[in-house]
Image: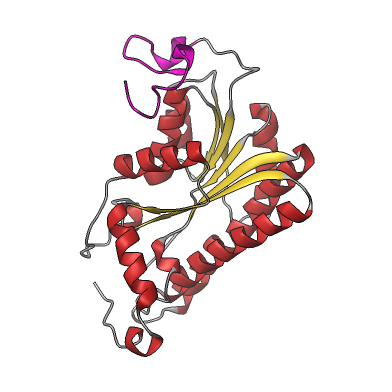
Amino acid sequence: MHPITKHLPMKYVQTDKQPFKKTIMDTTQTKRAIIIGATSGIGYETALLLLKEGWMLGIAGRREEKLKEFQSQAPDRIRIASLDVCSPNAPLQLNALIKSLGGMDLYVHCSGIGHQNFDLNQDIELRTLETNATGFTRMLTTAFQFFRENKKGHIAIISSIAGTKGLGIAPAYSATKRFQNTYLDALEQLSYMHRLNISFTDIRPGFVATNLLKDGKHYPMLMNPQYVAKLIVRVLHKKRRIAVIDYRYRILVCFWKLIPSFIWKRLPVKN
């Protein structure tokens, strides 16, 4: 049995002899998770692991055909919503997804874009800001308000180690990831001010082999999404506040933080 699921009751554990479609769940006890950006990469693999653990899932993304394909694995336990975080209608769609799922215990934000932008193309920078900052804020405020009404919940985001320092090769990307880190800090304080029982988890991966990095460039210490998702689910169970994934990147981040600005600006961080 996988170490992530060995502590769970058997009715929540997926086995080869217990296909998703035939799993009988006690829906009054089942946890419910909403995952934004679940059509590929980290979001998809994380959703798959939670599904195997017995969670009810509400998954959202822009590609409806991918959402339906995922839903076919367990139609009775998966609700879907085709949405774009950059759309003003996204909060309404998220609330509708939460309602169709019967509530929400965990919100996971995996949606984001990023590009190397050595020539500082303005369109790339603005699209990155719209998705990773404006769209991010649009969705997190909606999730926070739901948990505020229910007095409890768990908000988790997939940010990046790129928020540690400003990267000249990807200005908007690194800046928006720092924004996400700080925004979650602020929401945690706001939750405390409102006397709410909301947990917050900031997950900061290094380079992961997803569509985001399929640009023909070389990325060191590249991790596969399945490996990263296993670590993410472990972190979600523990409700860790900040988690850098994996141990190699934790070491790297520690060194980055020690580099003075006058040295950092001279480093040729370019692939």
In the figure, residue 186 lies in which quadrant?
Answer: bottom right
Q: Which residues are magenta?
A: 1-23
Left or right position of 142 against 72: right
Q: Is residue 113 above or below residue 124?
A: above
Q: Is residue 105 magenta?
A: no
Q: Vertical placement of 203 versus 132: above or below? A: above
Image quadrant of residue 14?
A: top left
How far from the left and from the top, in percent, is residue 78?
Answer: 53, 26
Residue at 62 percent of width and 17 percent of height? 27
Q: Residue at x 45, y 42 (%)?
A: 235
The residue lying at 27 percent from left, 50 percent from top is 223
Residue 155 location (% of width, % of height): 59, 46
In the depicted structure, whether residue 176 falls above or below residue 106: below
- Counting from the top left corner in percent of width and height, residue 194 is at 79, 51
Look at the image and tell me in which quarter the N terminus lies: top left
* Residue 19 belongs to magenta span: yes
Image quadrant where one finds the C terminus:
bottom left
Q: Is residue 117 visible?
A: no
Residue extending farthest bottom = 262
* Residue 139, percent from left and from top: 63, 51
